[in-house]
Image (cartoon, grey):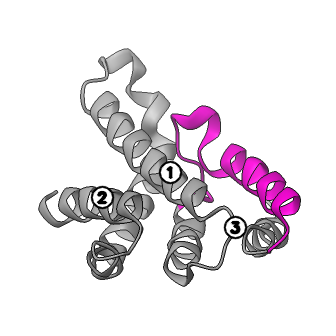
Amino acid sequence: MPDSRELHDLLRTVRSGDVESATDALFHLKNRICPQGVAVSGETATALPALIDVIVSGRSIVRGEVLRLVARISRASHAWRNSARHARPEYAGNYVGRIEWEVAVDRAFRDAVPVLVRLESDAEPEVASIAHDLAERYRRD
């Protein structure tokens, strides 16, 4: 069972003003919530609102990296969904436990659409662009 206190501590440290601490926490967070950059975990949906809040607050020294992680989670979730849809019957059982994670991640992104829409007018072009792409994906899915 994942330690939610550890997840909370990592999210708090990502907000820190200390570059080394924030970068290290983000590294460990990536491994927990987007393993190998291509999957979601049981903690991904829990972490997403906090990550989006880090982006909105604009105070994290690793804001751009957090935003890229959120975009990576979206891509991983989308790819996983396609893989599950097209799984051959003998592999369908591999997806059973993870479907709950996927549904929760999808819900977290849909809940974040109003925030993503506000971020479309962010002063940082990368933030505005990625927020626009994410908002478009989850408005229409």
Q: Nearer the viewer, residue 21 or 37?
A: 21
The circle drawn on residue 32 is: none
Tag 1's secondary structure?
helix
10 Å neighbourhood of mark 3: few (<14), some, or many (≥20)?
some
* Residue 61, label in figure: 3
**Residue at point 60%, 67% (across, down):** 47
Q: CA distance from mark 1 to mark 2?
A: 11 Å
Q: Is residue 32 magenta?
A: yes
Tags 1 and 2 touching, CB below 8 Å: no
Q: Marks 2 and 3: CB-CB under 8 Å? A: no
Q: Is residue 33 toward the left or the right of residue 89 in the image?
A: right
Amino acid type at circle 3 is Ile
Up-down: is 27 above or below 138? above
Is residue 1 visible in this depiction of the protein? no
Kind of residue sitting beneath label 1: Arg
Regarding mark 3 in the picture, which secondary structure is present there?
Answer: loop
Q: Position of residue 136 (x, y in %)?
A: 18, 61
Residue corresponding to mark 1: 68
Q: Quadrant of the N terminus?
A: bottom right
Give the mark, 2 or 3, whose residue is nearer the N terminus: 3
Which residues are the magenta region? 17-44
Q: Is residue 57 visible?
A: yes
The answer to which of marks 1 and 3 sits earlier in the sequence is: 3
Q: Looking at the image, which is closer to me, 11 or 127?
A: 127
Q: Earlier in the sequence, mark 1 or mark 2?
A: 1
Viewed as shown, does residue 111 lie left or right of 41? left
Residue at which label 2 appears: 129
Q: Is 13 contained in the magenta span?
A: no
Name the amino acid type tagged 2.
Ser
Left or right: residue 9 compared with residue 140: right
